[in-house]
């Protein structure tokens, strides 16, 4: 029996795999976005900004009202969920969205209590703290010119230092010349004005450097020409690449690797080893020079392999564990080799840092040519094509200028 040409057994297997990966896998194995337990203690203040400035008072206020039934109800909503998602190995900021409504109520109520009280010192300190933060915007247009986004600079960027200086001056006036009873309204007004300026003036100029749209242009060209091909995403899997390439991709090297731990090292956790080893090898090859990413010399490959070996050895990763990690990486990326062997046009997207260290493990990546490289947001990314794909691109008149490609070291 088949459904639309797909076997029921296959559908059931895919469903079971998906359910396992998205539940047990994310919670216990950290198959995606694995972070330490204190991750949300670092990200939550950023997500709550600028109301993070009121958190010291919120904590004092909530503790003073801890026996209030309404406060207990909100805490019963917030605390268990926060602990649950902190224990979960896989973490993303959006996972905490369910606790934002009760947190908003607690912050708003505590903040209004502060505004209506006679505690002018608390309010003035909050206003002074806010007066300092917008000053960072004064340096923004000049700092951008010193980054890889220098080409995105436009005269409209001067709106940021102007707004930042005005917000800082207004906050300073509130802190020094008034009881600061309107500090919450001032902060809200400043943030809204700055966000409107960013949305209307800054993002349109920066979008070509932040968006994956241009990077995914070859995929859209192939789709429009109805060229059949495989698309892989190695070491990353993000929705924006699916949206702009207008087709799904097959993620490789994003799940838990099937590491075969040697019997004489029973205390090694394969998940921790994978996370640790990827960080070690990524750092190890950052500064290894690659003159031409499409013609990696034996000397360059030897430098990469030696850097990886030395780094893993220095960090106490034994030879058997290094071999187990290498074999698992080769197996996880074998689809790239199989596509080339079958003569199937294939593209592979990956971070440049992953491309560098994979050169030390995966020989069949040499068959792929880097046809594009650049920044997408905070990532340096590369797009690789196998020989059948290069022929397919030539067939639709989209021959990449691979001679201009330079793979940057990861930031």
Image: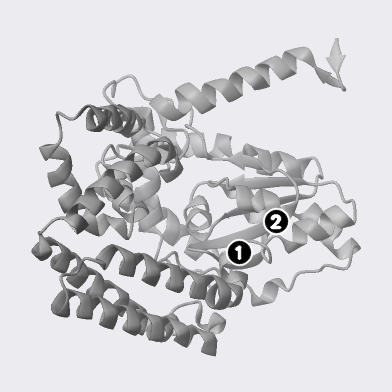
Question: How busy is the neighbourhood of tag 2: few (under 14 within 10 Å), some, or many (20 plus)?
Answer: some
* Observer-nearest of 291 and 60: 60
Residue linked to disc 2: 244
Image quadrant containing the N terminus:
top right
Give the answer, above or below, for where 197 lies relative to 389.
below
Q: How far apart are marks 2 and 1 (CA)?
A: 9 Å
* Observer-nearest of 372 and 214: 214
Image quadrant containing the C terminus:
bottom left
Mark yes or no: residue 322 visible. Answer: no
Secondary element at tag 2:
helix
Q: Which residue lies furthest to the bottom in this view?
A: 155
Residue linked to disc 1: 211
| Residue 236 percent location from the top left of the image | 54, 47
Q: Are marks 2 and 1 in contact (CB under 8 Å)?
A: yes
Mark yes or no: residue 115 visible. Answer: yes
Question: How busy is the neighbourhood of tag 1: few (under 14 within 10 Å), some, or many (20 plus)?
Answer: some
Instruction: Give left or right: position of 171 versus 20.
Output: left
| Residue 347 percent location from the top left of the image | 71, 52
Q: Residue furthest top?
A: 1
Disc on res. 89? none
Give the answer, above or below, for where 35 lies relative to 153.
above
């Amino acid at each position: 029996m088949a459904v639309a040409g797909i076997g029921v057994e296959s559908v059931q297997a895919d469903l079971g795999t998906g359910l396992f990966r998205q539940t047990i896998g994310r919670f216990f194995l950290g198959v995606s976005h694995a972070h330490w337990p204190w991750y949300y203690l670092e990200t939550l203040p950023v997500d709550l900004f600028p109301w993070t400035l009121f958190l010291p008072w919120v904590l004092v206020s909530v503790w003073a009202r801890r026996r209030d039934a309404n406060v207990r109800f909100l805490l019963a909503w917030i605390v268990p969920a926060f602990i649950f998602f902190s224990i979960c190995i896989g973490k993303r900021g959006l996972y905490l969205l369910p606790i934002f409504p009760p947190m908003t109520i607690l912050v708003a109520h505590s903040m209004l209590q502060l505004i209506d009280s006679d505690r002018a010192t608390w309010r003035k300190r909050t206003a002074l703290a806010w007066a300092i933060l917008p000053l960072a915007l004064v340096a923004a247009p000049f700092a951008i010119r010193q980054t890889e986004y220098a080409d995105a600079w436009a005269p409209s960027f001067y709106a940021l230092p102007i707004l930042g200086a005005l917000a800082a001056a207004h906050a300073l006036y509130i802190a020094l010349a008034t009881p600061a009873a309107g500090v919450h309204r001032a902060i809200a007004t400043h943030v809204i004005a700055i966000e409107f300026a960013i949305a209307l003036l800054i993002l349109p100029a920066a979008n070509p450097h932040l968006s994956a749209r241009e990077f995914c242009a070859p995929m859209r060209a192939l789709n429009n020409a109805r060229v059949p091909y495989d698309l892989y995403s190695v070491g990353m899997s993000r929705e924006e690449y699916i949206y702009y390439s207008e087709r799904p991709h097959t993620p490789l090297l994003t799940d838990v690797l099937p590491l075969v731990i040697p019997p004489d090292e029973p205390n090694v956790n394969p998940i921790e080893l994978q996370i640790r080893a990827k960080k070690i090898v990524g750092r190890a090859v950052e500064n290894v020079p690659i003159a031409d990413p499409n013609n990696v010399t034996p000397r360059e490959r030897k430098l990469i392999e030696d850097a990886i070996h030395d780094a893993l050895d220095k960090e106490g990763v034994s030879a058997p564990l290094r071999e187990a990690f290498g074999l698992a990486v080769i197996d996880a990326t074998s689809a790239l080799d199989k596509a080339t062997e079958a003569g199937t046009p294939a593209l592979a997207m990956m971070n440049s840092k992953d491309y560098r260290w994979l050169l030390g493990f995966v020989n069949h990546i040499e068959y792929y040519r880097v046809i594009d490289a650049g920044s997408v947001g905070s990532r340096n990314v590369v797009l690789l094509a196998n020989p059948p794909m290069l022929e397919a691109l030539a067939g639709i008149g989209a021959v990449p200028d691979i001679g201009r490609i330079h793979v940057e070291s990861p930031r």
